[in-house]
Image (cartoon, helix red, strand yellow):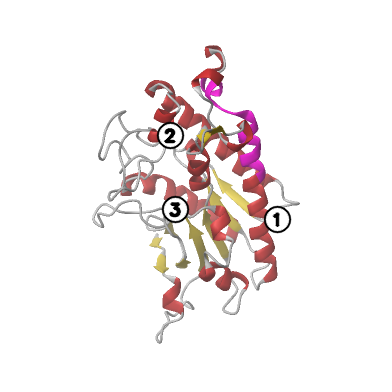
Amino acid sequence: MQKLTIHPPDALFSSEPPDLSFAAYRFLAEGDSWFSIGALNPLKNSNLLFEMRLRRSGVAINCATPGDTLKRMSQAGTDPNFVDLLCGRRARHWDGILLSCGGNDLIEAVQSPAVVDGEPVPHDRRLLLTQAEWGPPELGAQRYLSDAGWKTFCTYLQANFEHLFALRERGPSAGQPVFIHGYALPTPRPSGAGLGAGPWLHPALVAYAIPDDDGIVVAHELLRRLAALLAQTAADSARFPNLHFFDSTQVVIDAALPGATGVSGDWLNEIHLTKAGYRKLAVPWAAQIEHTLTGT
């Protein structure tokens, strides 16, 4: 099995660009911190791309940036390298497009406050409910969630996928496969990446007064909903042709302990995995990608 060779986009524009002709698979990658960095300590940092293993040689030009959302990925003004390499002046044919997306979009939505400038935020503009709005306990995690807000989120995410697929069709990689993944189920806890980055989920749950034990259930419910949404999107071949989803929630990942502030289980911090954790996801995902490309 071979590791995926990874280059930043700037390398292609340098005086001595890397030779990509050696690779059986040439990928254009874009995404959030699951494709880039999840911690400031380089000795601990890893991501899904680093841990991929393929039977044949592969290379990826990685445009990912921590904090990227699907909307930013598809906008030339905020991510010019990705759009340029997909359908712009420097576009080329890619064997596949690797995307790590949806996770930061979900986090942004979870962080939407209940009140802005003294005015309540409508239910369709946030995912969480205030204590006065909670449903009955028998609803479980759903008692804390805004159905109207989730509907807005689904519409937003799929609209941005449509825009991204339109970009794909404008370039030499029209019709080529797009590969996306889900996310493992985190434990909301006060554990960030350093220098004020994170935690991401825990403060929002605290702001909405959701009890810690229920906060774990809420986080898992949201990530499972995101996985179901991404699976549904990939299944809609009329709107999103040649889109392939890998459900990371089905892979066994050692959970972090509630309240742990550092490395715990397979987690480096609240939402990023250790090298071992990423490897548990990256190896089967790479196998799925290679099977899609070769049929074997």
Task: Name the front one of labels 3 and 2.
Answer: 2
Tag shown at residue 204? 2
Q: Secondary structure at mark 3?
A: loop
Q: Is residue 190 left or right of residue 230?
A: left
Q: Residue at x 39, y 28 (%)?
A: 206
Residue with the mark numbered 1: 241
Q: Secondary structure at mark 1?
A: loop
* Mark 1: few/some/many CA within 10 Å (<14, 14-19, 20+): some
What segment carries the magenta color?
140-155
Which residue occupies the extreme front position in the image?
Answer: 118
Q: Is residue 141 magenta?
A: yes
Task: Name the front one of labels 2 and 1.
Answer: 2
Q: Is residue 139 left or right of residue 201?
A: right
Task: Name the front one of labels 3 and 1.
Answer: 3
Secondary structure mostly taken by the magenta-highlighted segment of the chain: helix
- Using the numbered discs, state the Cα–Cα distance from disc 2 to disc 1 in whole angstroms: 36 Å
Estimate the x, y position of residue 222 in percent, counting from the top left.
52, 33
* Nearer-the-camera pick, 294 or 186: 186
Tag shown at residue 177? none
Residue 296 appears in the rendering: no
Residue with the mark numbered 3: 67
Q: Are marks 3 and 2 in contact (CB under 8 Å)?
A: no
